[in-house]
Amino acid sequence: MLEIKDLRVNLEDENKEILKGVDLSVEAGKVHAIMGPNGSGKSTLSYVLSGKDGYEVVGGSVKLDGLDILEMEPEERAAAGLFLAFQYPVEIPGVGNMTFLRTAVNSQRKARGEDEISATDFLKQVRERAKSLQIDAEMLKRPVNVGFSGGEKKRNEILQMAMLEPRMCILDETDSGLDVDAMKLVAEGVNALRDAGRGFLVITHYQRLLDHIKPDVVHIMANGKIVKTGGPELALEVENNGYSEILSEVA
Amino acid sequence: MAIKQQKFDPIEDATFQVANKNRGWSQKAREGALKRLSTMGMPSRRDEYWKYTNPTELLTEKLSVSPVVGLEDANIFSELDALKIVFCDGVFNPDLSDDLAAENIIISRLEENGDLHWAKNYYGLLEEKAQRPVSRSLAALNTAIASDGALIHVKGKVEKPIQILGIRNNTAEAILHHVIKVEKDCSITLLESGPFAKRLNSVMEVFLDEGASLEHIRAQGRDHDRLAVTHVFADIKENAKFKSFTLSANGMLTRNECVLTLSGDECAAHVAGASVGDGKSFHHDDTVFITHDAVACESRQVFKKVLRNGATGVFQGKILVKEGAQKTDGYQISQSLLLDEDSQFLAKPELEIYADDVACSHGSTSGAIDEEALFYLCSRGISKNDAADMLTLAFLAEAVEEIENDKIADIIVEKISAWLSRRRN
């Protein structure tokens, strides 16, 4: 479903290569995890996939269901089914969470040539999905992420994911800043969305999130490349031995 | 008659007008204003108070006649059930206006002859007081030669909002002077909209008795060639509440002055403005002067401006806390969202405090659209234009939220959204 081939990316302002030929395929229905030390290029990969400014793709390709997404604007990628759960969700004063969610859902529907969701259906869906993430009515009314705790922000990301029903979900360090209970809640939200038609790419520094979101495939990323790929046991290896052993092994 | 080419002198012109027409009960006040005006002279760019706005265009004689803007276009509040007082080319128009007779309120026009009128003791009073410490010559000029205006005396509960509506037909200039007096514990919602003329000089004097309240919501828009100088003066007594909000769009040169005196204990004054400007010819100036002269009063100023394509925004806001005005709570914020590098925002916030137990804060910022927020919205499928409009509206929201009446606030938001999306095409 998501096919990344030999992706090479520079920081736009400096001639510095961050991604040095990333190869990765995520199949529908599977959860892939990317682990790696700080500065290995994990977050850059998530930003490049979602279309953030400031990066220059100098080589390779990224296809979502066969479509070249690197040519698309961020909103077109979203409508095509790509979703990034941000490591640091942005606070937007003055824009109500509900208004934001509804505009997003309807913008995507419009882009796909579908009818807008009715106000009652939308409300019903939001309430239902918010409830399972323990997001109360008050949080829905507030401006997007403003005054939210770290855990609330991450749950709000998962709520957006649940409402937008993307084909391909990328979770960028979703566990950062979460305590064990909050992490469990977020993981449950993600697990509820797992199905045969949807792919996940879970980027994380630690193994602990993967205790809750069980991956099918684990990749280790270092220095802008995928250096090792394996099953869930690879995450445990990282947990027990750290990255240095694996990295010296592949060097 | 010999024709001598001379530079137009507004004071000479006003002197002529006052001397040649007796305006009945308001004549004495007009003569007083003319005297003040002669002493003060007209403003020029050299005056500190006009540092950021060039008054020249507000003072020239000849104006070309402008395109007609009709009633439909002028009334952005048409979906509200309001009692309409319509001025056409600066003169009250009884045919277009509603029946002015209503319960608990007396409405009349300035151009009513005779010698006895309740407004006799109020016309020009606040304008005169507001000439210190800063001269407001254009307001004095208005008192001297105003062609018409609404005189509104509120004596009880008023069912509907009162709306002052302006349309223009063939005259380039309108000089309107309104006086509003709200008796003890009474309240009124006052709407004001319309392109009154190509060049408008308007004064509104508001007297709020104990416990009275007034919410003033004004919309300036549709008239792309607007030159306007407006003054809102208010005297606010004990426990009274004054609120004023202005939406400004389009136009060329607009200077809105608001001069408020909190003269009774525990009263409140809130003044807010949202303006959206596009193009080099757009120049919008909000000048506010709030005097705290009683104990435990609250004042708020919230001004937001969105500027693009070389538009200019100005904010001059002052809070003066007099000796003895303890427990004053004063708040002032002025912010601009600059959508490109050609636009500019000039701000001069001032505090002058002579009491020692007060809380006053002021802030002023200029910034561009938050790129992080823009990307976040786009990453959820919202187009870049829509996302930018959402953030622009969000920026203006803090000012619009100052409007107490939700229905009116919704209309204002709708107008701003429409303006934003029109600009895309």
Image (cartoon, grey):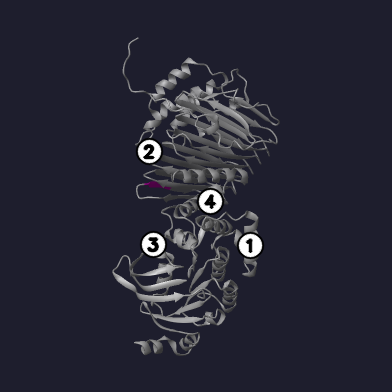
In front: B250, or B318? B250
Mark 3 highlights which residue?
Answer: A71
Question: Type of residue at label 3?
Answer: Glu
Characterize the magenta stretch by its predominant secondary structure.
strand
Q: CA distance from mark 4 to mark 2?
A: 26 Å
Kind of element beneath mark 2: loop
In front: A223, or B360? A223
Which range is magenta?
B343-348
Q: Nearer the viewer, mark 2 or mark 3?
A: 3
Question: Type of residue at label 2?
Answer: Ser
Q: CA distance from mark 2 to mark 1?
A: 48 Å
Question: Type of residue at label 1?
Answer: Gln
Mark 2 highlights which residue?
Answer: B281
For mark 2, name the chain: B
Do discs 4 and 1 belong to a common subunit? Answer: no
Q: Residue A144 vs residue B225: left or right?
A: right
The numbered dot on residue A47 is: none
Q: CA distance from mark 4 to mark 1?
A: 30 Å
